[in-house]
Image (spheres, rainbow, N blue to C red):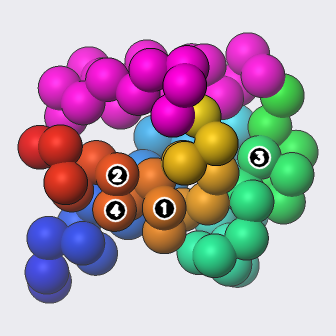
Amino acid sequence: MNNNQSLKDLVCNLILDIAPEADVQHLDPNEEFREELDLDSMDFMNLLDLILKETGVNVPERDYVKVNSLQSLTEYIATRK
C-alpha cells in the first residue's frame, strides 16, 4: 500500500470517528466530502483536529478551501508531513 492510500485510509477512519454513519466506502475522492457526507462545520473542525493529532499537520483556516475533497485533503497532508 502506498503512502497516499494509507493517508486516505487514515482520513476515512477519522471521518468515521466523528460521523460513524458516513458511507466512506462510496465516497468520491474528488467530490466535496462535507456535502457528500453531510458534515457540518463542527464535524469538519473535529476532523481537522483529529488530523492534527494523528499526523501533526495543522490546516489553517485560510486553507480550508484547499482541503474540500478526500483527494485534496490527502495531498495537503502528504506535502506537509
Relative to 81, does residue 73 appear above or below in the rendering?
A: below
Magenta extent: 41-63
User: Which residue matches tag 3?
Assistant: 34
Q: Is residue 66 left or right of residue 31?
A: left
Residue 33 percent across, percent down from the top left: 72, 56
Up-down: is 22 above or below 1?
A: above
Name the residue carrying label 1. 72
First reached walking from the N terminus: tag 3 or tag 4: 3
Question: Are discs 1 and 2 less than 8 Å apart at CB?
Answer: yes
Q: Amino acid at mark 4?
A: Glu
Rendered residue at 51%/34% (across/down): 63
Q: For mark 4, what is the residue? A: 75
The label number, if any, that marks residue 76 in the structure image:
2
> Mark 2–mark 4 contact, CB under 8 Å?
yes
How far separated are the C-alphas under marks 1 and 4? 5 Å
Mark 1 and 4 residues: CB-CB less than 8 Å, in contact? yes
